[in-house]
Image: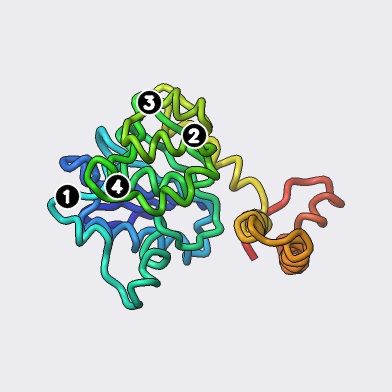
Amino acid sequence: MAQTGSKTVSYELDEHVATITYDRPHALNAVNGELRVDLNAAFAQFRDEEDAWVAIITGRGRAFCAGADLKDSAGSVGEFAGTYWEKPTLNSFESGWEIFKPVIAAVNGYCLGYGLTLVTWCDFVIASDRAEFGLPEVGLGSPAAVAALRLPERVGWQYAMDLLLTGDRIDAERAKEIGLAGWVVPHDELMAEAKRLARRLTARAPLAQRAMKEIAMRTRRLAPVEAIRFAETMRKVAAATEDAAEGARAVREGRPPRWQGR
């Protein structure tokens, strides 16, 4: 097990599963400038580390992430090169970094603002029965811009508008009911359930998983012919990997495959 991290985010890699933990519990894991830098670094490490196949993201303490730290709201956005119009899609995983490895959100408590925006970009959402979800931005006079792009696709128009335009919070059971969370589990079982799902994922071919996630993400707004062409190109690339050859060999030999991520 390898552990790295910083003052505000911890990163632990264990058997291809990276656990990324918001670690500002005294501030309900609200995002300030320091956490923004550390969180971006953790997701970049996961994206780039060959031995990391699946991520679980969670929070320490009573919150998953309570949104932007209003004492440092400018820092919570982050600083980076690029024009104003490039910034909304380039500065973090929440706002659109393309990471095609599977990501599981293990929502342990308050999941507000930036926290909920990140959850809408995760592939799986497992919620503690203590979790609460909400987008308080409208009550602060500011739109939850990226969440407004994603929520209608995730939960449907009316449920999305309810969260976006009222700023009201919902509990874990309601989040599951509208499709925002996939599972609700007792609080003390949250990480065990997330790790069980992660192990199910690491039992399969990681490069094939990434190819399928990329196909699913990139083809949503393509015309059918263009979508099929892209999917077929990705299939051919994945079929030429060492893992694809190992999968066929394992079937012939009647044994479990040994995936290498190559």
Residue 17 in view (yes/no): no
Query: Disc 1 and disc 2: Cα gap in Å?
Result: 29 Å
Residue depicted at x 38% and y 64%:
88
Kindly check if marks 3 and 1 are in contact, taking CB atoms under 8 A apart as contact: no
Kindly check if marks 1 and 2 are in contact, taking CB atoms under 8 A apart as contact: no
Which label's residue is closer to the chain start, 1 or 2?
A: 1
* Vertical placement of residue 71 versus 40, above or below: above
Quarter of the image that includes the C terminus: bottom right
**Mark 4 lies on residue:** 22
Residue 118 percent coordinates (x, y): 40, 49
* Vertical placement of residue 84 versus 5, above or below: below
Mark 3 surroundings within 10 Å by alpha-carbon count, few (fewer than 14), some (14 through 19), many (20 or more): some
Q: Residue 171 carries which label?
A: 3
Q: In this view, does 198 lie to the left or right of 223?
A: left
**Mark 1 lies on residue:** 70
Which element carries disc 4, helix, strand or loop?
Answer: strand
Residue 206 percent coordinates (x, y): 62, 55
Query: Disc 3 and disc 2: Cα gap in Å?
Result: 17 Å
Residue depicted at x 44% and y 23%:
173
Query: Disc 4 and disc 1: Cα gap in Å?
Result: 17 Å
Mark 2 surroundings within 10 Å by alpha-carbon count, few (fewer than 14), some (14 through 19), many (20 or more): few
Query: Disc 3 and disc 4: Cα gap in Å?
Result: 21 Å
Q: Is residue 243 left or right of residue 199?
A: right
Please state which amino acid type lies under the numbered disc 4: Tyr
Mark 4 surroundings within 10 Å by alpha-carbon count, few (fewer than 14), some (14 through 19), many (20 or more): many
Q: In this view, does 126 lie to the left or right of 250?
A: left
Residue 79 percent coordinates (x, y): 26, 70
Which element carries disc 2, helix, strand or loop?
Answer: helix
Q: Which mark is residue 93?
A: none
Which element carries disc 3, helix, strand or loop?
Answer: strand
Query: Disc 3 and disc 1: Cα gap in Å?
Result: 23 Å
Q: Which mark is residue 158?
A: 2
